[in-house]
Amino acid sequence: MTSLPSTTWRMLAQRTASKELPHGLDAVWDAAVGIGSRFVPRRGKFLREAQLVLDMDKAFACKSDNVLRSQAEDFRALFRCGKPKRPQVLEAFALVREVAFRQLGQKPFLVQVAGALAIESGCIAEMATGEGKTLTATMPAAIFGWRGRGCHVITVNDYLAKRDAQWMDKVYRFCGMRVAYIDQEMDPHGRRNAYLADITYCTNKEVAADFLRDRLSLGRLRGLDEALLAKIVEGSGAGTDRLVQRGLQYAIIDEADSVLIDEAVTPLIIAGAAPNPEQADAFRQAVDLGKQLTEKTHYRVSEKYREVELTNDGKEKLREMGAALGGLWAGTRRREELVIQALTAQEHYRLDKQYVIQEGKIVIVDEFTGRLMPDREWRDGLHQAVQAKENVEVLSPKETYARVSFQRFFRLYRQLSGMTGTAAEAVPEFWQIYHLPVVVIPTNRPCIRKMHPDRVFATAKAKWRAILGEIRACHEAGRPVLVGTRSVQSSEALSGMLTAEGLEHQVLNAVRHAEEAQVVAGAGGPGRITVATNMAGRGTDIRLGSGVADRGGLHVIATERHEAGRVDRQLFGRCARQGDPGSSVAFVCLDDELVRRHAQHSATALRARFGEAADEISSPLTRHLFNTAQRRAQNQALRQRKGVLRTDDWLDEYLGFAGAER
């Protein structure tokens, strides 16, 4: 297999790529192509090409700024008019590398150039945390920008989009290009100008939402031909003048695992108000009725799937209660749907975990990043059920105008690529959904992180006691500690424990996020204690303070294993960057949500064996329990993401919302 060139595998990928996920024998063939593509020696090729780029260093270093600008203009004309040969691409990389050094004082290392070449070739480049992915992206972004069709560099939040655009602006302007960024507050005119730039930095939510709004502006028009004809016939009335995007050509996705995988569970929806006071009252009544039902007798709870199912006794009791209320409660299906959502909110959704309350409103907390999502709502009445449960104003469900899954949206780009610190665990999914191969780029300096095995405890009480002891020991030794939690609730609880112990610390979570970058950047100071949810500073460097390296560097503690192993690895990757020392460890217990949901029977058996043991119960058997639970959680999440994409395909086929993108 290794003898086949990359172009052959690219041809096979294009042949197997389709609008819908493959089924049956097609799926088997597609999976086989994906497995075969892993044996293509891409990393060696990109490293060799990167060395050729570095070999041009002296040739470009002796050129004046005017000569470099003139050469950049020549490249712009070359890339816009045709497909350059590979040596010319490498020469263009060398030019951008020299420009970055002159404008920013930073010259990309060999591995950064290799990562950039992987991105330019349409791959996902796995580059360890702290390896300089922001600078890496400038080289392929410049190549795509020179082609004149627009390049979107997609980040995970507005802060990073603005920061990176402003930081790299000097490089792009020197190369004859205009850079812009999109933020939530921009009006349509500002967005249109930003998308007309050669390179546009934006978030996945903003670029997908603008795509949906453009689709709504076009109405029933499908494809370029119909749009042009309508423009000629109807003029501005055709909706084409209201478009803000100019097409989906090139996309470079930062934190690709977060954007393409973690965010893919929930589709993006454009919705509008649909006032219905009676419906809002019904959600309050549903919560009251749910409180009169008893678990196991009237309903069953599935921790694994976060679902609630009514028993026959529950349905009968609900029928009796509904008969007394009348109205919509007389209908069996609607009655049961409302109460099931109320029970789901009661059993599976917790304040300061899945959501917080701000200014009297329910605000969702992203499970993977720990960030607030003020513009998101749960679907099918669940959001209203949570509002009723927390006794805040219950707003009527919104009417859906348009929706698209992130998987479907990003598959519309002519060329998609990305970079992240954690892609290896998701190699099959990147291929199955996006036909993107993953290239693992080596670190610039050897990683000397000490990865300690998980420390397992029988109870949460014993686990937190051990965590406090670990934090105190590091603090007294002058080592900084970064503690990662899975929820706002856990971070606040740990903060209370640290305060009681007299340990000064800083907390970073969805509620206290205003100074995120500053808090994370300072987390490497001597003896510093930082408690953070999973958003712990993706995109921000943690630099070690004076003397910290001699004491062992930053120590990272995970207070639970996440359902996606990639998120654990991202957290551990906050330490031991660029050859610095550091260490990491996870503290877990049999009460953790991961094993309760995905290895319930095994966890129950071990709980019965160890009881309320206060000492550590770590062993190959107990650690295996958590590995098994995590693997099951990842497989379940993949099935859910595929389900979202198939739903999108079904809606497109039967409702005809979005025509083919050409």
Image: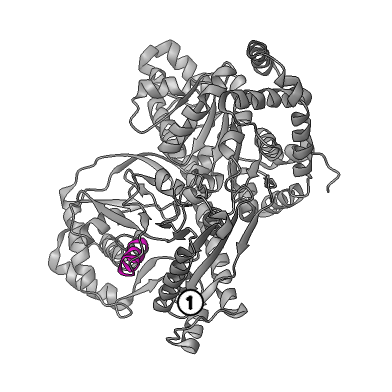
Look at the picture and state if 380 lies above or below 150: below
**Type of the residue with mark 1:** Gln
Q: How many marks?
A: 1
Look at the picture and state if 307 lies above or below 408: below
Asked whether residue 563 is in view, the answer is no
Q: Which residue is the site of mark 1?
A: 600
Look at the picture and state if 30 lies above or below 160: below
| SS state under label 1 | helix
Q: Quadrant of residue 160?
A: top left
Residue at x-position 14% and y-position 65%: 325
Q: Magenta span has 496?
A: yes
Residue at x-position 42% and y-position 33%: 212
Classify 10 Å Cα crowding around label 1: few (below 14), some (14-19), many (20 and above). Answer: some
- Along the line of sight, which residue is nearer the eye, 355 or 323? 355
- Along the line of sight, which residue is nearer the eye, 297 or 225? 297
Across and down, in percent, residue 323 comes to 16, 68
Per the rendered image, the range of residues in magenta is 491-501
| Quadrant of the drawing holding the C terminus | top right
- Along the line of sight, which residue is nearer the eye, 252 or 349? 252
In this view, the residue farthest toward the right is: 3
- Indicate left or right for 289 with 241 as reference: left
Across and down, in percent, residue 163 comes to 45, 33
Q: Quadrant of residue 313?
A: bottom left
